[in-house]
Image: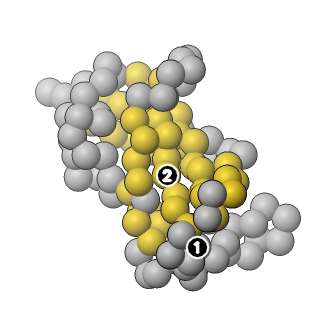
């Protein structure tokens, strides 16, 4: 998985993800109204969750596509390496994606 490059203080980058079943490669149906997806952000060397970002089902969720952005103050962090964990909730039943998202945040000019 590639690294998502970000800049301190920005709030408009939008990241779009397609969530698929690791065993079959099929997209995960997220269309149920009670299904939610969040991304939890932490420093790559830390254990504390710094932000929890709610994803939007861009096409209703049946195609497994979600998107999230970085509302202020999410990127008001020191420059460095960060990780994101994707968590899906199917009416309270939690499924966490095994692979982590990788982020690099650079300092603003």
Label for residue 38?
2
- First reached walking from the N terminus: tag 2 or tag 1: 1
In-front residue for pair 99/104: 99
Residue 18 in the image: state x and y as whole percent: 57, 67
Image vertical order of residue 84 relative to residue 29, above or below: above
Residue 50: image x %, image y %? 41, 28
Residue at horizontal 69%, vertical 57%?
A: 93
Residue annotated with mark 1:
30
Is 20 left, or right, of 84 in this rendering?
right
User: Quick one: label 2, few (<14), some, or many (20+) residues within 10 Å?
Assistant: many
User: Residue at coordinates 23% horizontally, 34% vertically from top-left?
Assistant: 73
Q: Residue 44 at what x, y percent from top left? A: 54, 24
Kindly identify the residue that appears in the image at 30 percent across and 24 percent down. Answer: 77
Image quadrant where residue 6 sits: top left
Q: Is residue 45 above or below residue 60?
A: above
Residue 27 seen by the camera: yes
Tell me if label 2 and label 1 are in contact, CB under 8 Å: no
User: How many numbered badges does the structure rendering display?
Assistant: 2
Q: Secondary structure at mark 2?
A: strand
Q: Secondary structure at mark 1?
A: loop
Residue pictured at 47% horizontal, 66% vertical: 66
Residue 67 image position (x, y, % from top left): 42, 63
Judged left or right of residue 109, residue 34 is right
- Which of the image's four quarters has the C terminus? top left
Q: How would you rate the neighbour count of disc 1 (Cα within 10 Å): few for under 14, some for 14-19, many for 20 or more?
A: many
Q: Which residue sits furthest left? A: 109
Left or right position of 74 against 51: left
As drawn, 81 above or below 87: above
């Amino acid at each position: 998985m590639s690294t998502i490059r970000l800049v301190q203080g920005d709030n408009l980058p939008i990241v779009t993800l397609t969530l698929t079943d690791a065993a079959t490669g099929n997209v995960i149906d997220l269309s149920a109204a009670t299904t939610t997806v969040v991304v939890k952000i932490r420093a790559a060397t830390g254990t504390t969750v710094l932000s929890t970002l709610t994803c939007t089902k861009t096409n209703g969720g049946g195609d497994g596509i979600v998107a999230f952005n970085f509302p202020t103050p999410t990127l008001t962090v020191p420059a460095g390496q960060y990780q994101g964990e994707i968590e899906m909730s199917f009416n309270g039943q939690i499924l966490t994606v095994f692979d982590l998202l990788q982020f690099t945040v650079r300092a603003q000019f």
